Image: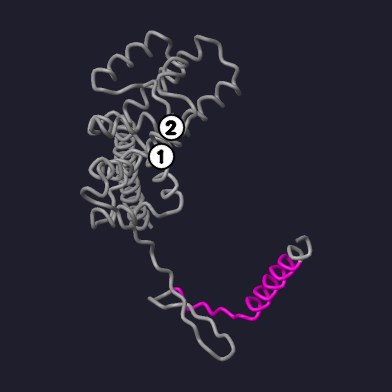
Amino acid sequence: MKKLLSYIVMALALLFCACLAVHAQQVVYKMPKEGNFMRYLVEEGDTVYIAHIRAAYCTAKGNARRNWRDYYRLVHNFGKVYNYAIEAGRLKREIDSTYAATNMSSSMQSKYINAVQDELLDKYEPVLRQMTYSQGKLLIVLIDRETGVTPYDIIHDYKGSAAAFFWQGIAKMFEGDLKKHYDPADKDAETEELVQLWYQGEYPAIYRSIFGKDPEIAVVPKMGKKEIARQQKEAKKAARDAEKKRKAEERAARKAAREAGRAARGK
Protein backbone atom coordinates (compact mmCIF):
# COMPACT_ATOMS: atom_id res chain seq x y z
CA MET A 1 0.00 0.00 0.00
CA LYS A 2 2.80 2.41 0.90
CA LYS A 3 4.53 1.56 -2.39
CA LEU A 4 1.31 2.29 -4.31
CA LEU A 5 0.93 5.67 -2.57
CA SER A 6 4.54 6.56 -3.40
CA TYR A 7 3.88 5.80 -7.10
CA ILE A 8 0.78 8.00 -7.05
CA VAL A 9 2.66 10.88 -5.43
CA MET A 10 5.49 10.50 -7.94
CA ALA A 11 3.05 10.48 -10.86
CA LEU A 12 1.34 13.66 -9.57
CA ALA A 13 4.72 15.36 -9.14
CA LEU A 14 5.75 14.45 -12.72
CA LEU A 15 2.41 15.67 -14.04
CA PHE A 16 2.85 18.95 -12.16
CA CYS A 17 6.35 19.42 -13.58
CA ALA A 18 5.10 18.66 -17.08
CA CYS A 19 2.37 21.29 -16.73
CA LEU A 20 4.94 23.84 -15.60
CA ALA A 21 7.16 23.02 -18.57
CA VAL A 22 4.29 23.44 -21.03
CA HIS A 23 3.27 26.71 -19.41
CA ALA A 24 6.86 28.01 -19.61
CA GLN A 25 6.88 27.36 -23.37
CA GLN A 26 3.71 29.37 -23.95
CA VAL A 27 4.21 32.91 -25.19
CA VAL A 28 1.35 35.26 -24.38
CA TYR A 29 0.99 38.28 -26.62
CA LYS A 30 -0.77 41.31 -25.20
CA MET A 31 -2.70 43.43 -27.66
CA PRO A 32 -2.72 47.25 -27.45
CA LYS A 33 -4.81 48.75 -24.66
CA GLU A 34 -6.78 50.92 -27.08
CA GLY A 35 -9.65 49.24 -28.86
CA ASN A 36 -11.59 46.06 -28.13
CA PHE A 37 -8.83 43.50 -28.85
CA MET A 38 -8.43 39.97 -27.54
CA ARG A 39 -5.27 38.46 -26.11
CA TYR A 40 -3.85 35.31 -27.65
CA LEU A 41 -1.03 32.84 -27.31
CA VAL A 42 0.85 30.73 -29.83
CA GLU A 43 1.64 27.14 -28.90
CA GLU A 44 3.45 24.83 -31.34
CA GLY A 45 2.31 26.92 -34.28
CA ASP A 46 -1.35 27.06 -33.17
CA THR A 47 -2.94 30.37 -32.15
CA VAL A 48 -5.39 30.31 -29.27
CA TYR A 49 -7.44 33.40 -28.46
CA ILE A 50 -8.15 34.22 -24.80
CA ALA A 51 -11.20 36.02 -23.45
CA HIS A 52 -12.44 36.69 -19.94
CA ILE A 53 -16.09 35.70 -19.67
CA ARG A 54 -18.04 37.40 -16.91
CA ALA A 55 -19.63 35.00 -14.43
CA ALA A 56 -23.35 34.34 -14.74
CA TYR A 57 -25.67 33.24 -11.97
CA CYS A 58 -28.92 31.33 -12.17
CA THR A 59 -31.22 32.05 -9.27
CA ALA A 60 -34.24 29.91 -8.47
CA LYS A 61 -37.73 31.41 -8.58
CA GLY A 62 -41.14 30.40 -7.40
CA ASN A 63 -41.55 27.17 -5.45
CA ALA A 64 -37.94 26.11 -6.07
CA ARG A 65 -36.92 28.68 -3.45
CA ARG A 66 -39.68 29.47 -0.99
CA ASN A 67 -37.94 32.65 0.19
CA TRP A 68 -36.84 33.86 -3.23
CA ARG A 69 -38.59 37.20 -2.70
CA ASP A 70 -36.63 37.74 0.52
CA TYR A 71 -33.41 36.76 -1.24
CA TYR A 72 -34.01 39.19 -4.10
CA ARG A 73 -34.73 41.93 -1.58
CA LEU A 74 -31.48 41.04 0.22
CA VAL A 75 -29.47 41.27 -3.02
CA HIS A 76 -31.04 44.64 -3.81
CA ASN A 77 -30.56 46.06 -0.31
CA PHE A 78 -26.99 44.81 0.04
CA GLY A 79 -25.62 47.21 -2.56
CA LYS A 80 -27.52 50.05 -0.90
CA VAL A 81 -25.97 49.63 2.55
CA TYR A 82 -22.70 47.69 2.48
CA ASN A 83 -20.47 50.69 1.74
CA TYR A 84 -21.88 52.36 4.85
CA ALA A 85 -21.01 49.30 6.95
CA ILE A 86 -17.46 49.44 5.58
CA GLU A 87 -17.32 53.15 6.43
CA ALA A 88 -18.55 52.38 9.96
CA GLY A 89 -15.67 49.97 10.43
CA ARG A 90 -13.19 52.57 9.19
CA LEU A 91 -14.60 55.26 11.47
CA LYS A 92 -14.50 53.01 14.55
CA ARG A 93 -10.87 52.12 13.90
CA GLU A 94 -10.07 55.82 13.43
CA ILE A 95 -11.80 56.82 16.69
CA ASP A 96 -10.19 54.01 18.67
CA SER A 97 -6.74 54.88 17.34
CA THR A 98 -7.31 58.54 18.24
CA TYR A 99 -8.25 57.51 21.77
CA ALA A 100 -5.13 55.37 22.09
CA ALA A 101 -2.77 57.95 20.57
CA THR A 102 -3.93 61.02 22.51
CA ASN A 103 -4.73 59.45 25.90
CA MET A 104 -7.85 61.62 26.23
CA SER A 105 -9.56 62.36 29.51
CA SER A 106 -13.27 61.59 29.92
CA SER A 107 -14.29 65.18 29.20
CA MET A 108 -12.06 65.36 26.12
CA GLN A 109 -13.47 62.06 24.87
CA SER A 110 -17.00 63.40 25.30
CA LYS A 111 -16.21 66.57 23.34
CA TYR A 112 -14.47 64.55 20.62
CA ILE A 113 -17.37 62.10 20.26
CA ASN A 114 -19.91 64.94 20.17
CA ALA A 115 -17.93 66.60 17.39
CA VAL A 116 -17.75 63.32 15.46
CA GLN A 117 -21.47 62.77 15.99
CA ASP A 118 -22.34 66.22 14.65
CA GLU A 119 -20.17 65.60 11.60
CA LEU A 120 -21.71 62.18 10.95
CA LEU A 121 -25.27 63.46 11.34
CA ASP A 122 -24.57 66.29 8.92
CA LYS A 123 -23.03 63.88 6.42
CA TYR A 124 -25.23 60.78 6.66
CA GLU A 125 -28.61 61.78 8.09
CA PRO A 126 -30.15 62.66 4.67
CA VAL A 127 -29.04 59.28 3.30
CA LEU A 128 -30.14 57.24 6.31
CA ARG A 129 -33.57 58.86 6.28
CA GLN A 130 -34.11 57.46 2.77
CA MET A 131 -33.35 53.86 3.80
CA THR A 132 -36.17 51.35 4.18
CA TYR A 133 -36.74 49.31 7.35
CA SER A 134 -35.24 46.21 5.74
CA GLN A 135 -32.16 48.17 4.65
CA GLY A 136 -31.73 49.56 8.16
CA LYS A 137 -31.94 46.10 9.75
CA LEU A 138 -29.42 44.75 7.23
CA LEU A 139 -27.07 47.65 7.98
CA ILE A 140 -27.24 46.83 11.72
CA VAL A 141 -25.86 43.30 11.30
CA LEU A 142 -23.31 44.38 8.68
CA ILE A 143 -21.96 47.00 11.08
CA ASP A 144 -21.45 44.19 13.59
CA ARG A 145 -19.56 42.26 10.92
CA GLU A 146 -17.29 45.16 9.96
CA THR A 147 -16.60 46.49 13.46
CA GLY A 148 -16.73 43.33 15.56
CA VAL A 149 -19.29 44.85 17.94
CA THR A 150 -23.01 45.56 17.71
CA PRO A 151 -24.33 49.10 17.18
CA TYR A 152 -25.75 48.91 20.73
CA ASP A 153 -22.27 48.30 22.15
CA ILE A 154 -20.81 51.09 20.00
CA ILE A 155 -23.36 53.59 21.35
CA HIS A 156 -22.89 52.26 24.88
CA ASP A 157 -19.09 52.62 24.71
CA TYR A 158 -19.06 56.08 23.15
CA LYS A 159 -22.24 57.74 24.45
CA GLY A 160 -23.19 55.79 27.57
CA SER A 161 -25.85 53.32 28.67
CA ALA A 162 -28.71 55.85 28.64
CA ALA A 163 -28.15 56.70 24.97
CA ALA A 164 -27.79 53.01 24.07
CA PHE A 165 -31.05 52.16 25.87
CA PHE A 166 -32.86 55.05 24.17
CA TRP A 167 -31.77 54.13 20.64
CA GLN A 168 -32.47 50.44 21.26
CA GLY A 169 -36.03 51.44 22.14
CA ILE A 170 -36.32 53.45 18.93
CA ALA A 171 -35.01 50.49 16.91
CA LYS A 172 -37.51 48.14 18.57
CA MET A 173 -40.35 50.42 17.49
CA PHE A 174 -39.36 49.69 13.89
CA GLU A 175 -38.80 45.95 14.44
CA GLY A 176 -35.04 46.40 14.65
CA ASP A 177 -32.52 45.24 17.23
CA LEU A 178 -29.24 47.09 17.82
CA LYS A 179 -27.98 44.13 19.86
CA LYS A 180 -28.31 41.63 17.01
CA HIS A 181 -25.08 39.82 16.17
CA TYR A 182 -23.95 38.86 12.68
CA ASP A 183 -24.26 35.10 12.15
CA PRO A 184 -22.41 34.12 8.93
CA ALA A 185 -22.77 30.39 9.55
CA ASP A 186 -26.56 30.33 9.91
CA LYS A 187 -29.00 33.23 9.81
CA ASP A 188 -26.74 35.53 7.79
CA ALA A 189 -25.19 32.88 5.53
CA GLU A 190 -26.72 34.38 2.38
CA THR A 191 -25.49 37.84 3.39
CA GLU A 192 -21.99 36.48 3.94
CA GLU A 193 -22.15 34.92 0.47
CA LEU A 194 -22.89 38.37 -0.97
CA VAL A 195 -19.97 39.85 1.01
CA GLN A 196 -17.60 37.31 -0.54
CA LEU A 197 -19.01 38.00 -4.02
CA TRP A 198 -18.55 41.73 -3.34
CA TYR A 199 -14.84 41.34 -2.69
CA GLN A 200 -14.46 39.00 -5.66
CA GLY A 201 -16.04 41.66 -7.89
CA GLU A 202 -18.98 39.39 -8.75
CA TYR A 203 -21.81 41.19 -6.92
CA PRO A 204 -22.83 43.19 -10.05
CA ALA A 205 -23.07 39.92 -12.00
CA ILE A 206 -25.51 38.26 -9.60
CA TYR A 207 -27.51 41.50 -9.41
CA ARG A 208 -27.79 41.62 -13.21
CA SER A 209 -28.81 37.96 -13.36
CA ILE A 210 -31.77 38.76 -11.10
CA PHE A 211 -32.86 42.26 -12.10
CA GLY A 212 -31.45 42.54 -15.62
CA LYS A 213 -29.64 45.81 -14.94
CA ASP A 214 -26.59 47.15 -13.12
CA PRO A 215 -26.92 47.60 -9.35
CA GLU A 216 -27.37 51.00 -7.74
CA ILE A 217 -24.46 50.84 -5.32
CA ALA A 218 -24.50 53.50 -2.60
CA VAL A 219 -21.65 56.00 -2.68
CA VAL A 220 -20.57 57.24 0.74
CA PRO A 221 -20.66 61.06 0.75
CA LYS A 222 -17.30 62.70 1.36
CA MET A 223 -18.77 65.89 2.80
CA GLY A 224 -21.86 66.95 4.66
CA LYS A 225 -24.15 69.90 4.00
CA LYS A 226 -22.25 72.17 6.37
CA GLU A 227 -18.90 71.34 4.80
CA ILE A 228 -20.29 71.88 1.31
CA ALA A 229 -21.79 75.22 2.36
CA ARG A 230 -18.51 76.25 3.98
CA GLN A 231 -16.53 75.40 0.85
CA GLN A 232 -19.03 77.25 -1.34
CA LYS A 233 -18.75 80.30 0.93
CA GLU A 234 -14.96 80.16 0.77
CA ALA A 235 -15.08 79.81 -3.03
CA LYS A 236 -17.33 82.87 -3.35
CA LYS A 237 -15.05 84.87 -1.04
CA ALA A 238 -12.01 83.82 -3.06
CA ALA A 239 -13.79 84.86 -6.27
CA ARG A 240 -14.66 88.28 -4.79
CA ASP A 241 -11.09 88.77 -3.57
CA ALA A 242 -9.75 87.84 -7.00
CA GLU A 243 -12.13 90.30 -8.65
CA LYS A 244 -11.06 93.08 -6.27
CA LYS A 245 -7.41 92.32 -6.98
CA ARG A 246 -8.04 92.36 -10.73
CA LYS A 247 -9.80 95.73 -10.57
CA ALA A 248 -7.04 97.18 -8.36
CA GLU A 249 -4.41 96.01 -10.84
CA GLU A 250 -6.38 97.59 -13.70
CA ARG A 251 -6.61 100.91 -11.82
CA ALA A 252 -2.89 100.80 -11.06
CA ALA A 253 -2.13 100.07 -14.72
CA ARG A 254 -4.31 102.99 -15.91
CA LYS A 255 -2.68 105.32 -13.37
CA ALA A 256 0.78 104.26 -14.47
CA ALA A 257 -0.19 104.85 -18.09
CA ARG A 258 -1.47 108.37 -17.32
CA GLU A 259 1.69 109.27 -15.43
CA ALA A 260 3.82 107.95 -18.26
CA GLY A 261 1.80 110.07 -20.70
CA ARG A 262 2.24 113.25 -18.63
CA ALA A 263 5.95 112.57 -18.31
CA ALA A 264 6.25 112.17 -22.06
CA ARG A 265 4.38 115.46 -22.73
CA GLY A 266 6.55 117.32 -20.20
CA LYS A 267 9.69 116.40 -22.11
| Quadrant of the snapshot with the C terminus | bottom left
The quadrant in which residue 141 appears is top left
What is the span of residues highlighted in magenta in the rendered image? 7-33
Count neighbours of disc 2 (C-alpha within 10 A) and say few if under 14, some if 14 to 19, many if 20 or more: some
Q: Which residue is mark 2?
A: 183
Q: Nearer the viewer, residue 11 or 185?
A: 11
Label 1 sits on residue: 189
Front position in the image: 52 or 5:
5
Other residues around mark 1 within 10 Å, as few (<14) / some (14–19) / many (≥20): few
The quarter of the picture where the N terminus appears is bottom right
The overriding secondary structure of the stretch rendered in magenta is helix
The amino acid pointed to by label 2 is Asp
Any magenta on residue 39?
A: no
Residue 54 versus residue 37 in the image, above or below: above
Q: Is residue 232 left or right of residue 24?
A: left
**Colour pattern:** one colour
Please tell me which residue is depicted at 35% across the width and 40% down the height of the picture. 220
At a point 43% along the width and 24% down the height, the residue shown is 150
Q: Amino acid at mark 1?
A: Ala
Q: Is residue 28 magenta?
A: yes
